[in-house]
Amino acid sequence: MSDAVIKAEALSLTFQTNDGPVHALKDINLEIGKGEFVSFIGPSGCGKTTFLRCVAALETPTAGSLTVNGLSPDDARRARAYGYVFQAAGLYPWRTIGGNIRLPLEIMGYSRAEQAARVKQVLDLVDLAGFEKKFPWQLSGGMQQRASIARALAFDADILLMDEPFGALDEIVRDHLNEQLLALWAKTEKTIGFVTHSIPEAVYLSTRIVVMSPRPGRIADIITSTLPRERPLDIRDTPEFLAIAHRVREGLRAGHAYDD
Amino acid sequence: MTWMRQHLMPVLTVVAAIIALWYAGAVALNAPWAYDQAKRADRDLSFSALVAETWSQDKPKLPAPHQVVAEIWKTSGDMVLRGKAFSKRSLVFHGWITLSATMLGFILGTGFGILLAIGIVHNRAMDMSVMPWVIASQTIPILAIAPMVVVVMNSIGFAGLVPKSIISMYLSFFPVVVGMTKGLRSPDAMEMDQMRTWNAGAWKTLISLRLPSSMPYLFTSLKVAIAASLVGAIVGELPINQDGGLGARMLVGSYYGQTIQIWSALLTAAALAACLVGLVGLVQGITLRRMGMAR
Amino acid sequence: MIWVVATILFWLVAWWINLKLSHRPRTRLTSFLVPGLFGITLLILWEGMVRGFAINPVLLPAPSAIGLAFATSLPVLWVDFVQTFVKGALSGYAIGCSAAFLIAIAVDRSPFLQRGLLPVGNFVAALPIIGMAPILVMWFGFDWQSKSAVVVVMVFFPMLVNTVQGLQASDHMQRDLMQTYAASYPQALMKLRLPAAMPFVFNGLKICTTLALIGAIVAEFFGSPIKGMGFRISTEVGRLALDMVWAEIAVAALAGSAFYGCVAVIEKAVTFWHPSQRRG
């Protein structure tokens, strides 16, 4: 794969703490191609979020190499290569929904006309047209998270990094947003890195699933999805889906075997 | 080790910077007088001589820290050693007067504050009629009328400790009311419902739920209250100085241009405030740890 | 005697009305009426007791006498107000608060200095800074400049501590977000940290309103020209003209509450998004 967007080779990250070193990531080898939807799944402490943060240059690896679009993560950050969606919406309460989505555009120096056009476009994309002038605290949790996705889509980054974006939402809202996210991915053809701890969510969304295990954080299994790109919600009841879910669960259990 | 690097070093740096600024300020402010003296005596003043001169004047505009510390030692520790701790010139004597007024006012103010807060929490009419005035009174410069209270009370025969304590009480009263009201209301709906399922009355709820959960709030306001109480006592000492007290020392000092005396009274007051707040903090730490609330 | 009985009667009636009112659902009207009635009751109680027990006006003048003194000496009160509040308190407040704000931003990039300044600032804010007043009067003379200086020292540290804390108030996630946008330091400051700091900044500004007025008035006890609220209070106390003293106190109370109210209104407009401001 020569068109790898994200490429990690023997990547390791060790935190020095008062209780000695903690190996958050150890020997990660992974290539993510353009337009892939890759999920990272594993128990807490397996390094899935840390890996995403390394890609976003929010953490610095201690060994190995990592490139994003062929650049170092920090250069990619400066080139504004990706949008990042956190677990909580993290919208600024003093800005309207429109103002929040405009925030990265203001920082990156888009013209006013361009800002307005893009805000309108992404609001349509996440089904929030008409809420531009509302404040975040006037919206439900699911709507806030959609607004934060819109904020990450507003500028021209072809990578979307999502760290348990739907973790704090209830099952019903989560199903709905999963469906919308797939539609969005199909429309925008972005490369998505997605951290989750829900097996059905990972299987439903991804083209590839990276199963990770803790202490030290490393890759236990990489599963390529056999599901078609077109995925209605009830695909989750098909034997094919269940088979992949089973394999993910096996991978998670194997990672845990010698742990406790 | 980390604690030292994380907290002690920065604080020491800032304190050192303040002391350095103080010494520099002493040079700058006292230099004119030093030059004047030198000119009269018809001698040249080298820079080192100037610095030495500005740090050792009798009535400097700004005394250097070591002068103030020497004065404090002369009027406290030294006098204690010579058995004259309660002489009229001793800072121990004046500090004691201020401290007793502060403590009396603080205890009264805290007591009244807690009682009023309990009333406010349990009685809706009291809540609605009193609370807005308590908050409004925070915006009124009560401290500014302190001297008047002292003078008037003196004229009707209340002299000495009581008038000052009343000001202290007044100042320490408000933070306690506000903090305690917040604290007594801090149990959430679930905890209150739990009490109701056990059929606990208002009194039982107060004793076993409201009061314990208000403790962190109480101590936070007690720290504010004791500092305010000290300020009240000092300001209360300003108009009548024959009784003594740190405030009286400051006023007398300002009458006679005894800057070193003012600064030593000021620093003693600061040390007293630090000790009092620190003491409340200590009791807070012990109590909250006993109650399992320490963070 | 009639005065005492009538007053107590009024008190009971007013308390009864308040009890009734407070058990109705809280509306804008009742939450204004109940404390209003309580305040009026206090005034009438005061007036009635002073008249009923014929309390010496040197000790405690009746509210009506204070009102009379207030109405008849408006020009004097105005001159005092301008000298103490406008010249002394306001100028010191503006200088002290903006200096503290700017220094807080200046040390913002140094966590080391912040960790040092916070405890020291908290400590100094609890000290009886007002004791600096005689020294500053010596340095800056009797006129309003020295009062302004006292106010500057008094408001500086509370404001500094609040602003430094406010600038640390934005959470990690929001800062990370700024990082992913590759935002520069000024951009992050303007777009995230300063707006997030506003509730703290206004908390400091509100605390400082009262401090400013106290500082300006108390500083006048250590020397002032023959005008000013503190000067008037101390001289009228000397002449035992307590009605005039209380009139000055009323001015101070009005000025203090109005000042606080103004800052609170601005706060409401700026930090409308903060949970404490969202509901009426």
Image (spheres, coloured by chain):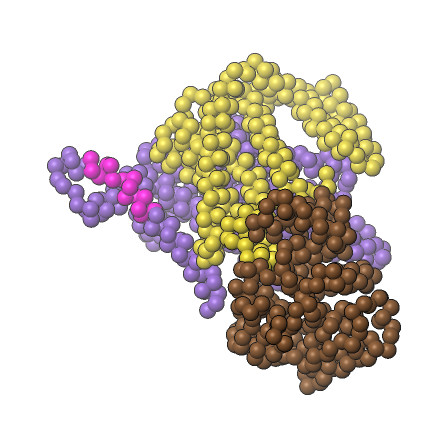
Chain colours: A brown, B purple, C yellow
Residue A67, given in percent of the width and then of the height, sits at 56, 71
Please tell me in which quadrant of the rendered image residue B119 appears. Answer: top right
Residue A64 visible in the snapshot = yes
Residue A217, given in percent of the width and then of the height, sits at 62, 77
Residue A8, given in percent of the width and then of the height, sits at 59, 75
Residue B210 visible in the snapshot = no
- The answer to whether residue B225 is left or right of residue B264 is right
Observer-nearest of B195 and B88? B195
Which quadrant is the N terminus of chain A positioned in? Answer: bottom right
Farthest residue to the top: give it: C72
Which residue is pictured at 58% across the width and 59% down the height?
A80
Asked if residue C214 is positioned above or below residue A216 in the image, the reply reads above
- The answer to whether residue A113 is left or right of residue C161 is right
Please tell me in which quadrant of the rendered image residue A185 appears. Answer: bottom right
Asked if residue C79 is positioned above or below residue B143 in the image, the reply reads above
Which residue is pictured at 63% across the width and 59% down the height?
A157
The segment highlighted magenta reads B22-36
Observer-nearest of B188 and C264? C264
Residue C36, given in percent of the width and then of the height, sits at 72, 28
Q: Main secondary structure of the magenta part?
A: helix
- Asked if residue B33 is among those painted magenta in the image, a careful observer would answer yes
Which residue is pictured at 37% across the width and 40% down the height?
B262
